[in-house]
Image (cartoon, rainbow, N blue to C red):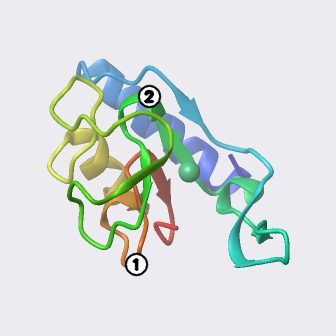
Amino acid sequence: MCAVLAEPTRKALNSLLARGETINSVTGYRVGLTRGTLDDQGNRTEYSNHSFGIALDINADINGLYGNCIQFNAGCRLRKGGHWQPNKPGGLHKNKPTVRTLKNIGYKWGGEIKGRQKDFMHFSPSGY
Ligand SMILES: [Zn+2]
């Protein structure tokens, strides 16, 4: 994570673990072109917030990234990670302590972003 977010994020995750929350995987810094417009070969052209160390993904195996998903329903298409299982330990939902705690320190949750994607594993200052 970037230097500004690393310590508050570490403290928040440690407090969640101490309270018995299930956090099996965390991915922060990762360079990738996953935002912006498509080039002529269908590839994204802008760096993700992970590329700047200001985003993290938690328990991606049960909190997938979906496209075609203005509101979550059976028509949403899983694009990354595993199927969203919000009621499993480690599954994320707006009322789960992990989501509430990270929002309290300034993150927005990718499960609540506007638009065609719902990224249930993802947290960043903008949610994107
Ligand atoms: Zn992410």
Q: Is mark 2 within 8 Å of ligand 1?
A: no
What residue is at 41 percent from the left and 73 percent from the top? Answer: 116
Q: Is residue 79 above or below residue 14?
A: below
What residue is at 24 percent from the left and 34 percent from the top? Answer: 85
Q: CA distance from mark 2 to mark 1?
A: 22 Å
Residue 15 rendering spot, x and y as whole percentages: 34, 30
For label 1, the residue is 115
Q: Amino acid at mark 1?
A: Gly
Q: Crowding at label 2, few (<14), some or many (≥20) Cα neighbours within 10 Å?
A: some
What residue is at 78 percent from the left and 66 percent from the top? Answer: 43
Which type of secondary structure does the marked residue at label 1 adopt?
A: loop
Q: Is residue 34 left or right of residue 116?
A: right
Residue 83 rendering spot, x and y as whole percentages: 35, 36
Q: Is residue 6 left or right of residue 75?
A: right
For label 2, the residue is 61
Q: Amino acid at mark 2?
A: Asp
